[in-house]
Image (tube, rainbow, N blue to C red):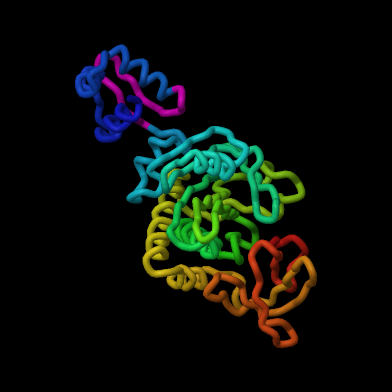
Amino acid sequence: MRKRILELLRENGQKLVSGEDISRKLNITRTAVWKHVQALKNEGYEIESLQKRGYILRRIPDRLFPQEIASCLKTKWLGRDICYKEKVDSTNNFAKKLANEGCRDGLLVVAEEQEAGKGRLSRGWISPYAKGIWFSVVLKPPFLPQEASKCTLLAAVAVAKAVNDIKGVKAAIKWPNDIILNGRKLVGILTEMNAEFGHINYVVIGIGINTCASRDDYPPEVRDLAVSVADAAKESFLRVELLAAVLKNMEELYELSVAHGFSAVFDEWRKYSCILGQKVKVIAPDRTYLGTAVDIDSDGLLLVKTNNGHLEKVVAGDVSIRPATASKGMYQ
């Protein structure tokens, strides 16, 4: 019912909507209308109430409420089912729980805060309250399990395109799953799969976008490594609109990949890459070597030409990569 009241208020812009009109259209009492309006105010909606005249929606809160996401969505199916949490240990963990219970394809799990966010190689991901977009999507793709890792590159392209539509933001992708802005980490992506032989049950793609966190929101050891969209943006933006843009990009790229393969995604990934053509240091479990990142192959693996001329394929999850001349930790 609150969702319908919000829709009526939005439809009328800055014009008054009387309580009588709302009660008649929704078939509820005016007292019920008043109670719902008070509840919306408690959630942070700025609704002006003029005695005996009606209501005006003046401002929406900066929260990732399902009704706000739905009002911005331009997807056909991705993100149409929304699970919203104020706090959760990890959106990926919660999404996997719902996937195991049989949720629909395209489910979105979004939280204002993660208390135990997960990054690649068992690293943590700091997710301060309402200072970022912390979310996961559940996909049930028809392709083979060996294709699942390519979804990480797909997600990176979707996010890079969305954040770079904000004036002043020039982010780039560091293989395989980080998005870098001004030399610091802006976005982390973690893809997890549940599969049987030859069949994917589901893929969960978790994405963390730092939108407006400050240095003080991070512990001292990572303050110089993180950056937010707001640090570079030269125009205002809403978290909910940025999330909707990412989901739209993801749906388009995913449908293209299901129909025609990932080659178009890889071409887009190359455009946003900050690693191709750069000297890199590859730190693998069994050895460390220097080389030049030259391309990604048809499996999405990074191709590095070593200093002795050999072409090495780097497998995501097994290595860390950073520019050969960078200080330790800059691009970890």
Q: Residue at x 43, y 69 (%)?
A: 261
Q: Relative to 25, is 249 above or below?
A: below
Residue that extends furthest to the bottom in the rendered view of this protein: 309
Position of residue 149 measured from the top left corner of the image (x, y, whole percent): 56, 62
Position of residue 183 measured from the top left corner of the image (x, y, whole percent): 64, 62
Position of residue 85 measured from the top left corner of the image (x, y, whole percent): 52, 34
Position of residue 259 measured from the top left corner of the image (x, y, whole percent): 37, 65
Q: Relative to 55, is 150 above or below?
A: below
Tell me if I can see residue 253 in this picture: yes
Question: The C terminus is located in which quarter?
Answer: bottom right
Give yes or no for residue 44 being in the magenta stretch. yes
Tell me if I can see residue 187 in this picture: no
Answer left or right for 236 relative to 134: left
Q: Relative to 310, is 188 above or below?
A: above
Q: Residue at x 25, y 26 (%)?
A: 16
Give yes or no for residue 247 being in the magenta stretch. no
The stretch in magenta equals: 42-58
Residue that extends furthest to the front in the rendered view of this protein: 197
Q: Residue at x 72, y 71 (%)?
A: 282
